[in-house]
Image (cartoon, grey):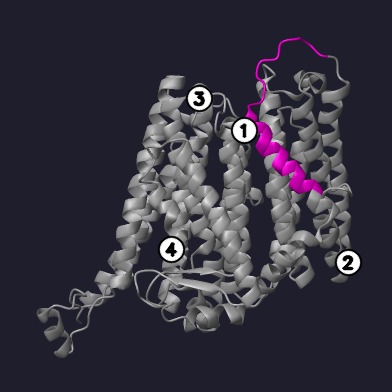
Amino acid sequence: MAAFLIPLLAKISKELVRIVPGLVIGYLSVVSVILMTQVINTGQPIIEVIGGWSPPFGINLVFSAFTGFLVSLMTFMAFLIWIYSYRFKKIDDAPAQKYFILFMMLVTGSIGIVLTGDIFNLFVFMEITAIAAYSLTAFYRDRDGAEAGFKYLLIGSFASALMLLAIVLLYTQVGTLNMAEIAQRMHTVPQGMKITIFTLFMVGLGIEAEMFPLNGWAPDAYSQSPGPVGVAFAALVVKAGVYSLIRVIFTLFDIHGAYEFLIIMGAITMVIAEISALKQTNLKRMLAYSSIGQMGFVLIAFGINTNAAVFGAIFLMFNHAVIKGLLFMSGSYLVYNTPSKEIKDMAGIGKKLPLVSLFFALGALAIVGLPPFSGFWSKLYILMAAADSSFYYLMGTILIVSIIEIVYYFRVMGRLYFGKPQNDVILQKPTFGGIVAMSVLAVVIITIGIHPDFISGFIQSAADTLLDKAGYINNVLQSTNL
Amino acid sequence: MDIDYNQLMSIGVYGSAIGLILIGLYAVLIKKHLTKIVIGLSIIDAGIHLLFIAIGYIKDGTAPIFSPGGLKALENGQPMVDPVPQALVLTAIVIGFAVTAVALSLVIRLYRHHQTARIDQIKSLKW
């Protein structure tokens, strides 16, 4: 169980620059998948106590079905990103070392956010992730990365200040930092104070989760950072942000109206982001806005708050990580082959880079939710859940937004395949590792699409665990020392 | 008429903590110079740290150490201050330091790139 701490150790052994991160992440993902099946079979979460102090005094890590699923997803994606960026174009030896250190920090932070059972530890891990993310955004010296990075840093550190303030206020009210114990004592907190703390948390965490008025950083960060980092943001950072938001809302607070608030914020996020995506001319910015839109969709699904909707939401989180990963990976090769990064310059690339374009097209079809691919199932489940809870306006909004999504993805695909090639030069062919990573993702998308039962068992138990608040509290507080 | 110095003191500490947060907020939102914005962020952090420490402090409390002196004070009915906020603030200071360092390095990078450090003159990225 000490395997959770390996990413921390890995930062020490960073000298074997290229190989070690991959081995560590690969090992971690294998371990977390094994642990996840074990947890689901026994039905009992693993709770790791750090430093020998039992909760609520010490910091503890909780590996339940829900967190385990997310950690497995994250480590799996991190492993693929490692394969993808192993010989990525612009990363030479000296920057490669920095790149992999920062990347490992990002992975560590994201996993830590998901696993921790302590609200202040969550803040610490969030800062680790954030610092790595700022630096990775500004990784290239020749682009506007520094500007995007500074913008992200300004918003991000403001968010963390608010979150720290929220933790301070929470501590004065409940006198503990353990999340299970906070949840237990929450009913003693006066209503006004509760809403104040809740608002501070929402703003602080909403920034990391790309919630609507707070996501100004995202398009810049995605478009200016190196290709694989965009994948890491979509698959790790944002997932961790959404996780912590969900954890705070579902486990810590029981405010009346929080779920409705989540639905409204999610709907606004989704509509605004998809409309902005429609008018983007830069491919990566378009993908970034689409990513924000998907997160809005996830928030809506969590806000509906029935078992089926939460199931759909977790499924969508999985799909978004995999599909958006594929889109960013293939998209950044498309971008390298155009001088301006604009969609209009990509005409006819489909004939010159058939494989990359095929992957991009596959990802685009999957994310708009066409039947043979995995994106279809999550959308279907969420719509069915919305229908069950009779949110008919919401269903209408989701469907209209899906049409917008189809329009802008198909516009890119039309350019790729039916446009006239402008010049004959191929600037950059995909590396072998890049092709491997993209093929794995494509295979996952199609397999899950044809046979969703393959992972739905995991997701179902993850959803059950998330909704079982009393079980979470009991399990954490009863574990003395494993 | 006697003034409750204790209460006055706590109002002063809490007030200055909130004051620091507001000053920092002002700097972040109004100032146009990148370095001043970074300073503003640090001031917000300092304000929150002060607030945190003030919450953990108990009047006449001793240091929360299980030393002979500390235990003796405990037997005499003297309270200990809450150690948790102090530990948290220590961590938060380290984090704040790291963030400030990254921020300043980005400011240097931006200055070299644009030959200016005013945000109203750096606008190559927009929505």
Same subunit, tags 1 and 3: no
Q: Quadrant of residue A195?
A: bottom right
Same subunit, tags 1 and 4: yes
Q: Which residue is mark 2?
A: A387
The residues tagged by marks 1 and 3 sit, at their Cα atoms, a distance apart of 41 Å
The residues tagged by marks 4 and 3 sit, at their Cα atoms, a distance apart of 50 Å
The residues tagged by marks 4 and 2 sit, at their Cα atoms, a distance apart of 44 Å
Residue at (77% x, 62% y) in the render: A312
Same subunit, tags 4 and 2: yes
Q: Which residue is mark 1?
A: A433
User: Residue B66 location in percent, x, y?
Assistant: 18, 78
Q: Residues within 10 Å of mark 4 (few under 14, many from 20)?
A: few
Secondary element under disc 4, as helix, strand or loop, is: helix
Position of A30 with respect to A281 (left or right) is left
| Mark 1 residue type | Gly
- Say if mark 2 contacts mark 1, CB within 8 Å: no
- Say if mark 1 contacts mark 3, CB within 8 Å: no
Q: Residues within 10 Å of mark 3 (few under 14, many from 20)?
A: few
Q: Earlier in the sequence, mark 4 or mark 2?
A: 4
Q: Earlier in the sequence, mark 1 or mark 4?
A: 4
Question: What numbered label is drawn on residue A2?
Answer: 4
Secondary element under disc 2, as helix, strand or loop, is: helix
Q: Earlier in the sequence, mark 2 or mark 1?
A: 2
